[in-house]
Image: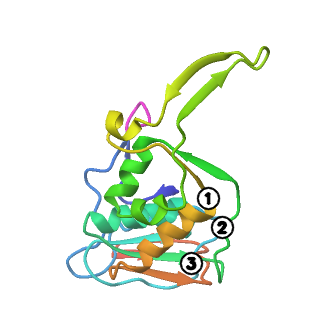
Amino acid sequence: PLLLDALQIQWHPLGERDFSHRRCLSRSGSLNGATLLTDTDNTLKAADITTGQNHVLIAGAGIAGLTAALCFEASGCTVSVFERANEIFEIGAGVQLSPNATRILERLHVLPRLAAKAVTPGQLVLASAKTSKPLLTLDLASAKRRWGAPYLVAHRADLHEALMAQVKSRPSITLTMGTSVLDFQAKQDGVQV
């Protein structure tokens, strides 16, 4: 998702972001430096969000938006996810999930929901496009032992379904379907979306 935090992002000369001073909500309850994430091209229309401490707003309930919601929730934030579609129909093909991705999914308690539908390939073979001769063979069967997390192949819909189930099980994440986020405006006392 694209991270928009108009009040708190500080850009460094090399383009690195410094998020060390980000605030989600002020103690008074009004949004102050709120984080708005978007992975869709629409946004929530004219609604003031003024709820509790550390509130994060995410526009888009795709794979990136749901993963971000779970990460923010795990760090103590209350999260509101807004999705423009009334229903989610995840389409697409398979995705390869390397150990760095499955390690995060495991920490977010998503991996057990996904593992039954995913496949652990025995190896990955990179071959020459001209000759079809193998250039590199990587043993993936031992990925969990070697890197601390498995290498998996899954269908996008199965990954999305596992993320959605975990999001719905978390009481501090609110998912609102059929709501487009159209714009946001940073104000002195908060953010209006």
Residue labelled with disc 2: 90
Residue 178 image position (x, y, % from top left) = 62, 84
Question: Disc 3 on helix, strand or loop?
Answer: loop
Query: In screen coordinates, is 122 left or right of 56?
Result: right
Check contact, mark 2 vs mark 1: CB within 8 A: yes
The three-letter code of the residue at mark 2 reads Glu
The answer to whether 176 is drawn above or below residue 138 in the figure is below
Disc 1: which residue: 156
Q: In the rendered structure, which segment of residues is drawn in magenta? A: 12-16
Mark 2 → mark 1, Cα distance in angstroms: 7 Å
Q: Earlier in the sequence, mark 2 or mark 3?
A: 3
Nearer the observer, disc 2 or disc 3?
2
What residue does disc 3 label? 44
Q: Quick one: label 1 or label 3, which is nearer the N terminus?
A: 3
Q: Is residue 145 magenta?
A: no
Q: Secondary structure at mark 2?
A: loop
Residue 154 on image: x %, y %: 58, 54
